[in-house]
Image: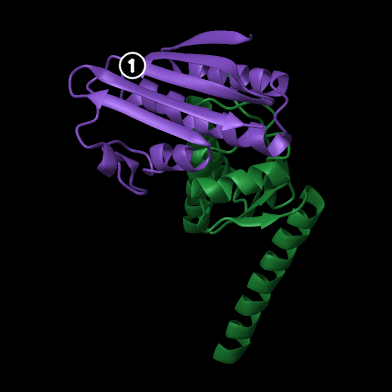
Amino acid sequence: MDRIPILKLGEALLVTIQVDMHDRLAMALEEDLTTRIVEVSAKGVLIDISALEIVDSFIGRTLANIAMIAKVLDAVTVVVGMRPAVAITLVELGLSLPGVRTALNAERGMAMIRTLLANDDHAYGDEAEGAA
Amino acid sequence: MQRSAVTIQSGEDVVRVRQEVRRIAIEAGLGLVDQTKIVTAASELARNTLDYGKGGQAMIEIVQAGARRGVRIMFEDTGPGIPDIELALKDGYTTGKGMGLGLGGARRLCNEFAIESAPGKGTRVTVARWK
């Protein structure tokens, strides 16, 4: 079966969905990403959906699941590049993508991940100082 | 007039339905947002045909009323049918593993929506989106 490639970029994993995903492919991506997050101790996951012409309830649920699983594994997920027509349709469909952070494009998404991770480190630092 | 039939027996067929609906929606002259809405609705309904109806088929056609053009899709299966249609249309209600947004969501994304179902005989859902 086809698989969607997952690239490692520093502390983050990068996924660009470039095919019209059938449901099993979306489920395989969820599994593969989960495995990779643990394998490389990723702190961030960037999913580029700019090539996706639709996001239906199954794909939407998969994105929300990935964000939830990543969170449990201490990684942040940012979905980037949603097309305007897809955003309009998603809202009308009734899908709110709970827990999924979004950014307009990959560049902003990476910046968001860096900021979130920097704040995270900072918070730990403060805690350590307070305890000392 | 453009017409197309797609058999729905697998997840790949759901993708095929999306592609055919997109092709015919473009042919009918629907704008990008309307195309996206009808393709998304078709994806939900094709998945229902597969998961709940145990497979079936989608008939996609261009329809014309005066100067208006649109796309109409009929999904048919011979599965177990839907005992309570009102309940099935409610957001969040599901007998499967999904989110329960498919049927109600598809209705919101289309200009026309009709559903006929009889327990043990199957289900037919017809939707249309006009330009």
Q: Quadrant of residue A43?
A: bottom right
In this view, A67 is above or below B97: below
Question: Is residue B56 at least partly visible in the picture?
Answer: yes
Q: Position of residue A15 (x, y in %)?
A: 67, 39
In this view, B22 is above or below B131: above
> Which chain is indicated by disc 1?
B
Question: Is residue A28 at least partly visible in the picture?
Answer: no
Residue type pointed to by label 1: Asp
Which residue is farthest right? A107
Q: Position of residue B21 (x, y in %)?
A: 60, 21
For this rendering, which residue is in front, B111 or A74? B111
**Which quadrant would the C terminus of chain A be assigned to in this image?**
bottom right
For this rendering, which residue is in front, B98 or A29? B98
Residue count near mark 1 (Cα–Cα under 10 Å), binned few <14, some 14–19, many ≥20: many
Q: How many marks?
A: 1
Q: Residue at position x 59%, y 23% from top?
A: B71
Q: Residue at position x 54%, y 59% from top?
A: A74
Q: Which chain is green?
A: A
Secondary structure type for disc 1: strand
For this rendering, which residue is in front, B128 or B7? B128
**Which quadrant would the N terminus of chain A be assigned to in this image?**
top right
Q: Position of residue A24 (x, y in %)?
A: 48, 26
Determine the colour of chain B: purple
Which residue is farthest front? B66
Q: Quadrant of residue A39?
A: top right
- Horizontal side of B34 relative to A69 (left or right) equals right
Residue picked out by circle 1: B77
